[in-house]
Image (cartoon, rainbow, N blue to C red):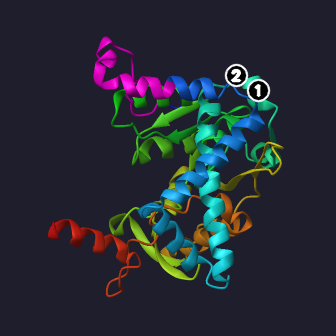
Amino acid sequence: MSKPIAIKTPQFSSALLHPRYWLLWLVFACWWVITLLPYPFLIVLGKLLGWLLYALGGRRKIFAARNIELCFPEKSPEEQRRILFACFENLGIAFMEIGMAWWWPKWRLRRLVKVEGLEHVVAHQGQGILLLGLHFTTLELAAPFFAFHYPYGALYRPHDNPVFDLIQYHGRQRSDSVTFFPRGDLRTMIRMLRNGEIVWYAPDQDFGPDYSVFAPYFGIEAATIAATPKLVQMGKAVVLPFSHERLSWCRGYRVVVHPPMQDYPTGDERKDATRLNRELEKHIRAQPEQYLWPHRRFKTRPPGESDLYPIEKKSSRKKRAK
């Protein structure tokens, strides 16, 4: 695969045994032990954790509820609350799945997944593939599931805590199938695409006004990252949407590589952003309960529009008053 801008590989050192890290080491040890349990037990424990997170509430629950309200105005308040509760239930399960992704042997993971649509990858071998991902709660598991079949490149954001970063990095990099590059490393992404390789890319979050164009997303003008069509053009790539879902009744996971996006990009910035958002929206609507709603997707507003998350400003005013 193409050689990316170097990411400093976290290495174990005696400094990580300092007493200030002991509690975190204990948490990871307990987490590892829990992942040894049978899969159905992990799902049940994850749901219990999700219920606890829901009961504790907090800002993230408020943001998630607001996002669901904005994106699904046609649903009744009861339906919106059901999606919110299921979202937190799935967030709890996701904690268990992180441990599975980092520590389970590959043979154990393989038994749980069904991957569909690989014929679209085969049809475009030799051409760069931009694997259009989304932030579903099953994201951490989707990476090794796809890597069982094809190597790919993906963004890696180091954790501020060195112990967490050590375990996270090596948990995700358990084989030579994934090439990590830093956030914003467009050169490596373009080079990989031009070399006929696969790059996983998720443009479904708000990266601020400097890197975005406003386009409708669930009927709301949303800051949409403008780099996507440029990556496709400069990398001479095809865009294959990529979704993944957790099946009910502990039946495992379904990962799907969808047919390529047609007539994209067009060269019209807003039109391309609208087309991209429509594609993302389609996959989120198919399984809204498993989407990562707690992020502030609409935090950047067009000039003159009011904040859609007033809780943020209220919290800031309270802190200044104190």
Mark 1, other Cα within 10 Å: few <14 / some 14–19 / many ≥20: few
Q: Secondary structure at mark 2?
A: loop
Residue 168 locus on image (x, y percent): 48, 31
Left or right of 287? Residue 162 is left
Q: Residue at x 77, y 58 (%)?
A: 259
Q: Secondary structure at mark 1?
A: helix
Residue 128 locus on image (x, y percent): 62, 46
Residue 11 painted magenta: yes
Q: Which amino acid type is marked by label 2? A: Pro
Residue 70 painted magenta: no
Q: Is residue 132 visible?
A: no
Determine whether label 2 and label 1 are within 8 Å by CB.
yes
Q: Residue at x 39, y 16 (%)?
A: 12
Left or right of 307? Residue 278 is right
Furthest residue in direction left, as rendered: 321
Quarter containing the C terminus: bottom left
Quarter of the image where one finds residue 141: top right
Q: Residue at x 78, y 49 (%)?
A: 120
Q: Which residues are magenta?
A: 3-28
Mark 2, other Cα within 10 Å: few <14 / some 14–19 / many ≥20: few
Residue 242 locus on image (x, y percent): 69, 53
Q: Is residue 178 visible?
A: yes
Which residue is denoted by mark 1 in the rendering?
A: 108
Which residue is denoted by mark 2 in the rendering?
A: 105
Residue 13 locus on image (x, y percent): 34, 13
Which one is in front, 207 or 110? Answer: 110
Which one is in front, 158 or 261? Answer: 158
Q: Which amino acid type is marked by label 1? A: Arg
* Position above or below: 90 against 77: above
